Image (tube, coloured by chain):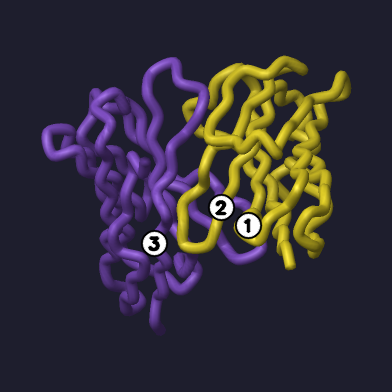
Amino acid sequence: DSGVTQTPKHLITATGQRVTLRCSPRSGDLSVYWYQQSLDQGLQFLIQYYNGEERAKGNILERFSAQQFPDLHSELNLSSLELGDSALYFCASSVGSNWETYGYTFGSGTRLTVV
Amino acid sequence: DQQVKQNSPSLSVQEGRISILNCDYTNSMFDYFLWYKKYPAEGPTFLISISSIKDKNEDGRFTVFLNKSAKHLSLHIVPSQPGDSAVYFCAASARDDYKLSFGAGTTVTVRA
């Protein structure tokens, strides 16, 4: 157990729907990062939050949004889902506002299937 | 735009032999490199890293080599063990960047 908790582990939904993925960072970590891994591709950075504030944005679609709550857990909201949104979504956390020397700590991911 | 590339999607090696995983990058601003290991149904876990001021870093059976002029790094696993069967991701970051850029991964299978 890495200490980063992601729920749900699996999610199957229809096109056009909206889903929320949840992430609880490791205890003491202030930063949360969201990554998307599509089939046969590397992890693509979506967005980072540090202590409740958005810190950096990657290739995140306008249909996607995220937030980090006062208890530091984060939610990634995906709306108007398309077949191409099917992927593994990873959350990672780190202590500081930047990745540490040893990188992030990742959760086990949420596998989203859009049908 | 894939700034970190792992051109070999898979590698099969016999137990006890050396595994060599390769990674190329295009962003000359990258100055820190990491390797992650991922088992099925788990998130990636940190394996080893190297700063651009070094050309080699060793940790037990794992050694990472960095060739800055060629924008190339490699991970050597010696000797390979069955538990090393996993997907290995190369990642890189520029100074003061907030994110890591990942390659697509190489699936390593260690045969008994």
A98 vs A80, nearest the viewer: A80
Q: Are marks 1 and 3 on the same chain?
A: no
Give the secondary structure at mark 1. Answer: strand
CB contact under 8 Å: marks 1 and 2: yes
Please identify the quarter of the rendering in which residue A92 is found. top right
Q: CA distance from mark 3 to mark 2?
A: 14 Å
- In the picture, one chain is yellow; tell me its letter: A
Residue A41: where, in percent of width, then height? 46, 56
Q: Is residue B111 above or below residue A9?
A: below
Coordinates of residue B38 in the picture (x, y in percent)? 54, 57
Q: Colour of chain B?
A: purple
Numbered mark located on residue A37 in the image: 2
Instruction: Tell which subunit mark 1 falls on.
Output: A
Q: Amino acid at mark 3?
A: Thr
- In the image, residue B58 sits, relative to residue B69, either above or below, namely below
Tell me whether the residue at label 3 lies in contact with that at label 2, contact meaning CB atoms closer than 8 angstroms.
no
* Residue closer to the observer: B102 or B54: B102
The residue indicated by pointer 1 is A87
Q: Which residue is under mark 3?
A: B106
Quadrant of the image containing the C terminus of chain A: bottom right
Q: Earlier in the sequence, mark 1 or mark 2?
A: 2
The chain to which mark 3 is attached is B
- Disc 1 marks a residue whose amino acid type is Ala
